[in-house]
Image (cartoon, rainbow, N blue to C red):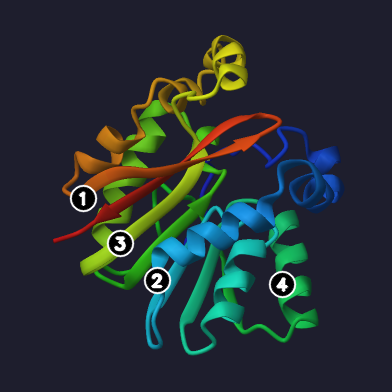
């Protein structure tokens, strides 16, 4: 895999917070619940090849493997520290997941590789040009009939979310999400996209997105 000089934002914005990532996700953000719902939405079958885009510490990828042991699961992230944790967790759970280092806007996989591409609370870290490049890459690596499944910050739908919205919109990486632009960004390369549901968290309103490649 070729090396890259691209920069990335650590999952909690600051590297010193990385050791606390799983604790915050589990007990404050309730990630196991919304990741379970995302996996149910993806309807992963035996023999499917699945990519967890921006996998972080590997929770979603490991959950996918546990829910469908006969799927071939990959996790990709730009942060080697996160991937070290992911590999350790997968070994402890005896979950066979392949973890790769790379960027979402330049995926190290051939065309039409995956039946499912999934992502959990990662897209909002990308600036608009990188979201657009990532959308094109997702379309490229999906097989015909393959599906994209994302949960991330979306257009606020609760009063609490609408109160937080102006604050989140100030961040360059998050404004596409808060404006509700993700379906268009991921639909432009050719996916048929839709928002399928919502999930409330302390940090704001999340949206489930589904995209299908015809």
Q: Which of marks 3 and 4 is in front?
A: 3
- Mark 4 and 2 residues: CB-CB less than 8 Å, in contact? no
Look at the numbered disc 3 and give the secondary structure of its residue: strand
Of 208 and 185, which appears nearest the observer?
A: 208
Q: Nearer the viewer, mark 1 or mark 2?
A: 2
Q: Where is residue 154 in the image (x, y as percent from the top left)?
A: 46, 31
Task: Kindly identify the residue that appears in the image at 79 percent across and 39 percent down.
Answer: 15
Q: Where is residue 94 in the image (x, y as percent from the top left)?
A: 72, 86
22 vs 150, left or right, is right
Instruction: Tell me the quarter of the picture where residue 80 sits.
Output: bottom right
Q: Name the residue under label 1.
A: 191
For residue 11, which numbered disc appears in the image? none
Q: Position of residue 203 (x, y in %)?
A: 68, 29
Q: Distance between the residues labelled 1 and 3?
A: 8 Å
Q: Mark 2 points at which residue?
A: 43
Q: Name the residue under label 3.
A: 147
Instruction: Tell me the quarter of the picture where residue 107 sits.
Output: bottom left
Disc with the residue nearer the chain's start (1 vs 4): 4
Q: Distance between the residues labelled 1 and 2?
A: 18 Å
Disc with the residue nearer the chain's start (1 vs 3): 3
Image height of 106 relative to 15, above or below: below
* Residue 69 shows in the view: yes
Task: Kindly identify the residue that appears in the image at 43 percent across and 44 percent down.
Answer: 197
Disc with the residue nearer the chain's start (1 vs 2): 2
Q: Mark 4 points at which residue?
A: 87
Q: Distance between the residues labelled 4 and 2?
A: 24 Å
């Amino acid at each position: 895999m070729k090396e890259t000089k691209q920069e990335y934002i650590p999952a909690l914005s600051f590297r010193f917070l990385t050791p606390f990532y799983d604790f915050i996700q589990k007990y404050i953000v309730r990630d196991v619940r919304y990741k379970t719902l995302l996996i149910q939405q993806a309807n992963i079958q035996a023999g499917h090849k699945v990519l967890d885009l921006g996998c972080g510490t590997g929770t979603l990828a490991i959950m996918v493997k546990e829910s469908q042991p006969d799927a071939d699961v990959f996790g990709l992230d730009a942060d080697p520290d996160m991937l070290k944790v992911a590999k350790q967790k997968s070994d402890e759970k005896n979950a066979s997941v392949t973890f790769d280092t790379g960027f979402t806007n330049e995926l190290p996989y051939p065309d039409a590789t995956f039946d499912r591409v999934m992502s959990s609370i990662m897209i909002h870290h990308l600036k608009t040009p990188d979201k657009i490049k990532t959308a094109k890459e997702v379309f490229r690596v999906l097989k015909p009939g393959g599906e994209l499944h994302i949960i991330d910050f979306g257009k606020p739908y609760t009063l609490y979310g609408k109160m937080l919205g102006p604050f989140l919109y100030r961040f360059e990486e998050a404004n596409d999400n808060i404006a509700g632009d993700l379906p268009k960004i991921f639909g432009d390369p050719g996916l048929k996209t839709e928002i399928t549901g919502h999930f409330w968290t302390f940090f704001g309103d999340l949206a489930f997105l589904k995209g299908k490649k015809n």
